[in-house]
Image (cartoon, rainbow, N blue to C red):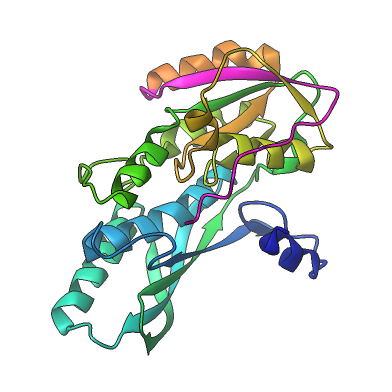
Amino acid sequence: MNKEDYLISNFKSKHIGDDGAVLQNTVYSKDLFCEDIHFKLSWMNLEQIAKKSMLVNISDAIAMNAVPKQALLGLVIPTKFTKSQIKELSSGFKKIADKYNIDIIGGDTTSGDKLMISVTIISKTNNPIYRNSMKKGDFIAFTGSVGNSKKELTKLLRGGTINSKSRFISPDLKADFFYEASKHINAALDISDGLSKDLSRLCKSSGFYGVKFLRYFTKQELCSGEEYEMLFSFRKKNLHKIISIAKKHRVNLTVFGVTCRGKYTSTCKENHF
């Protein structure tokens, strides 16, 4: 049983089901970032942890074609943390907030045994992009590359180390490309649980579409979570426009499939260890 899906099924709000909840021109998105589920303290320093907790939520806002404006932070801070460690966490939050012109307007803290971070991002959009707007015959594409994050996670789980600039530690968001390309995009979400898993969500949300793949993917590419690349569909007539925008922003683009009749189902396991 997918416990997340079961929990969500108990709430009937029409706003549930996308990377963020859209109310008029405002988008609300929230993510949890928890020790021993999403990271270990031995893998990343506290500034890196704070930065990533912000970036993974900003990625949701971008996928909705929304520009982040404010953030609320909720933290469970380990009792053993010193002032110096709390300052390091704060520095990470502030650096990402400054980079994306986000005002941190409040939140809450409590103490506990492990570090847990909850980030709520409040964004603005005049043209939200939903998951359920994919059409039959759409091309499907993603930005960047997929597969490296799973490779890096596997290395960490085996006791190894990875570069501080790696995808797993510091997601590379493609905001400028996506905002400019948004007027040509039908449906989108960010790749947080793996290309295959998130593709199945896109297909289900839009009416159980199937996918005709135009290229082969390895299992690692299909099942690698926490990539935070943009996965989206668009009409074939917009292909050259989107390629042009990608080249302008120096973003690698992979057009890998076409929607068709049928049903696409992911066979990948859940990513959180």
Check residue 271 for magenta coloring: yes
What is the residue that sits farthest to the left in this orientation?
84
User: Which of the two residues, 10 or 139, is positioned nearer the viewer here?
Assistant: 10
Looking at the picture, tell me which residue is in the foreground, 171 or 112: 112
Is residue 157 shown left or right of residue 265?
A: left
Q: Nearer the viewer, residue 92 or 148?
A: 148
Give x and y (percent) for residue 141: 58, 24
Quadrant of the rendered image containing residue 185: top right
Residue 169 x, y percent position in the rendering: 30, 49
State the residue lying farthest toward the front. 158
Left or right relative to 269: residue 51: left
Mark yes or no: residue 23 visible.
no
Q: Residue visible at 62% across and 56% down?
A: 20
- Expressed as whole percent of the image width and height from the top left, the position of residue 50 reads 31, 63
Residue 221 appears in the figure: yes
Q: Main secondary structure of the magenta part?
A: loop
**Picture layout, residue 16 above or below residue 215:** below
Highlighted range, magenta? 249-273
Q: Verify whether residue 163 appears in magenta.
A: no
Relative to 159, does residue 244 appear above or below in the rendering? above
Say which residue appears at 73% left-offset and 65% top-offset. 8
105 vs 210, left or right, is: left
